[in-house]
Amino acid sequence: MTAQPQKIQTQGETALLQQLAVLDLDPTRQAAADRLKLNGLPHRRVEEWKYTDLRALLKDVPQLSKAKRTAASSVAKPLIPADFVLTVVDGIPQEISAAGTTASAEAKKAVSIEIGLGDASGFHEKANTNVDLNMALASSGFIVRFSKSATPPVVFIDHIVSDADAVTAACRHSVVVEKGAQAVLVERFSGPDDTAYVASAGLSVIVEDGAKLTHARVVTEGIQSSHLGTIGARIGSEAVYEPFVMTLGSHLVRTDVQITFDGERSHLGIRGATLVKGKDHTDMTLEVDHASPNCTSIEQFKSVIADEAKAVFQGKIMVKQIAQKTDAKMMSQGLLLSENGEFLNKPELEIFADDVICGHGATCGDIDEDMLFYLLSRGIPRPIAETMMVQAFVAEAIEDTEQPAIIEALEAILADWLAKR
Amino acid sequence: MPAVQETIEQVKEIDVDKYKYGFVTDIEMELAPKGLSEDIVRFISAKKEEPEWMLEWRLDAYRRWRTMEEPTWARVDYPKIDFEDLYYYAAPKSSPGPKSLDEVDPELLETYKKLGIPLNEQAVLAGVEGARVAVDAVFDSVSVVTTFKDELAKSGVIFCSISEAVREHPELVKKYLGSVVPSTDNFYATLNAAVFSDGSFVYIPKGVRCPMELSTYFRINEEKTGQFERTLIIAEEGSYVSYLEGCTAPMRDENQLHAAVVELVTLDDAEIKYSTVQNWYPGDAEGKGGIYNFVTKRGDCRGKNSKISWTQVETGSAITWKYPSCILRGENSRGEFYSIAISNGKQQVDSGTKMIHLGKNSSSRIISKGISAGRSQNTYRGLVSAHRKAAGARNFTQCDSLLIGDQCGAHTVPYIESKNSTAVFEHEATTSKISDDQMFYCQQRGMSDEEAIALIVNGFVRDVIQQLPMEFMAETQKLIGISLEGSVG
């Protein structure tokens, strides 16, 4: 009578499990693979995936890329002038080429780069399907350590999918900013528009005591692709972590960001912009764990939705009982440019400490008619006026980034997206 | 400064009685056998002298309920309820359906007198000269008495117990019952559909402004009983009604289940104002006993320019799990939700609202104030959604939480879903403790900690209290003081 209905495996699940079965996995990766096998891909009845039904959206998990590691042949123009330009092709990190390195002697001394699978201690302990997927699939990545230097060295990691056939490109990097060090890290993801490849991008970050990391991730994948990104970061005492996640939509982009405050008097400033059009589906899921007292955090996200696209924001601020004197502010805003776009927003607060100031705000709507009229009445044609308004809307999040080069790069991407729309 | 004086008085009162409604009325009761089966459903239906279609409706719900699983998604934690260990029907033994107050068991009247509920029709509420409130008093599973019926009937208003409505106005009940909360809606709503024993029925005819406030007073008395009441309010075109609901229960060591369903329907230009002061027994400081309050409340703004406003003050119950919602179907329809949820001791609250915008230019407003003290957990969970056709929908949400002490939790889980570009939604939430500056200011003026907290909290919830009908305002202010007793230090 109480027989459970047989769970039907989707094509995506079958493909995923078949691949995991033949991989030679270490215990950590095997544990992640086992969890995936047990639970399957999450669907909309799983709260964290309520708006992104991965079971339905991830139609296939193509073969993991078998590309060989080579010396990076052609180096694409980095997003910002960088001391080190690292390349990942189809999920395989390429040899660090001297050509891509314009680092000064000082920067060379402050940065150590290796190829391999670093630890993933930046992530939360609680299992998360996106993290598990990356853990199980990724077999390599860059291990980057920054030590103390006078000026922050800049590392740019370019992720390219080049295969003509659809592949799964998975990698996981591990970044440590040592005590008192400062660094700038920029990641870019791109690929062809004509294949339905899958990119699984993992990044574990440790910002040690007194360190500072400015980080930008730019996701500009091909329109048919599925990008499953994760960032797990731990922040020590008196440390600063400032990430920016810029997402241009594709068939599916889901980014899980997990941040933990491990020390006191630290600051997190996480910002993001999501630009979607066509039938794009993007999902930004953020979990900030205030596990230490006296920390501050700002979370600011902007979503611009055109055509029939769908943008999801799920942000959770968790304040543990020990984390007294926390000051956390989260803002998520959506701008719907078309009738059929969807903006799904879930900003959560989970608070167990009493001496805190926490707040969140959420808005959504279309372009303000009054403001538009103001511009039109000054002779600015409607399309330009609209573009100006969108630019201003997104710029609010971008311009708080500290590195002028990053601001410039992000604004260029925004302008380009608007021009092509 | 009258506010200060009032606060001091409240705090004084607190010392004497904490939960003053915790007494038990010793009255002979008629109980159905324990447990739930088709026979029990038939028993309840027979007791209520219901027509065949009603019994069928109940049985359908019962059979479906058997296949359903208890939901676990809310942020509340409690031992599994043994649904077979409950009485589903408990009624005071007396002649069925008393014709006048004289026929009601004096013990019962005494109970309501103790609770401060005026069942005597001549009674005038203290302080509100001339105000009259029609009351439907529900004791365990049955409606004891409904006052002012004749006077209401003069203006065409029907106000009676739902069992009476099933018998006397079957066409209305048939048309509207389950049309807002279908019997298949959720686990507890389905259970309610199968075993609901009483509740209130209100029908306001076209163009009538209900001449007085209507009110239902729910009292759980018997041990090991579940209370399942069902309220149905229909406001025809251009009508208006304000409805109040209050509830208390004796102090017992065991947990008792209260799973009610409330359905509201407003047609063109109609308005329903529904206010609740929920003060079920919350359990003792260690979390022993108390009521599980699992309620489905939903209003359907079917007509153009119709309006439904929910105001709730939640101070009682061991666990509160309810989301009074509005389906804004009509053009220009409006939904409002004002809530104060106070939790102390080991209480758990998971409450909020849903505003579902379907109609053009529909608008909604949500003001929620959560206060958690002691070791309680207080969650606001709300949904605001605009469907494709809800052009020009507008929502403003504000949910503020106040934490008193470092052992409690306050959580906010809003879902904001927009599928229409012309919909404009704004949401803001804050969580903080009572600021030291405010406390210092009060203390400096000679107030004790508890007085100061009561004053500040009253200020914090003022936006919501102002929405309450006059009769409830004073009571609520007092309740807030009582609920927070012992939360300092």
Image (tube, coloured by chain):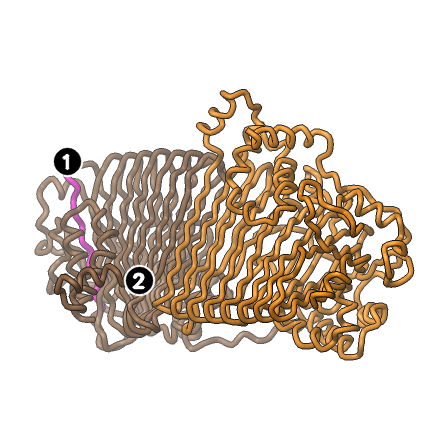
Chain colours: A brown, B orange
**Which residue is labeled 2 in the image?**
A335
Q: Quadrant of the N terminus of chain B?
A: top right
Question: Do callouts 1 and 2 point to residues on the same chain?
Answer: yes
Q: Residue B126: image x %, image y %?
A: 71, 41
Q: Please provide the residue range marked out in magenta.
A: A151-161
Amino acid, disc 1 = Ala
Residue B39 visible within the image = no
Residue B384: x and y, percent? 46, 61
Q: For mark 2, does the 10 Å Cα neighbourhood hold few (<14), some (14 to 19), or many (20 or more) residues?
A: many
The residue at 15%/56% (across/down) is A409
Instruction: Identify the mark at residue A150; answer none if there is no mark.
Output: 1
Main secondary structure found in the magenta portion: strand
Q: Quadrant of residue B268?
A: bottom right
User: In the displayed structure, would residue B392 be above or below residue A157?
Assistant: below
Depth check: B357 or A392 in front? B357
SS state under label 1: loop
Q: Residue at x 82, y 46 (%)?
A: B111
Q: Is residue B13 left or right of residue B111?
A: left
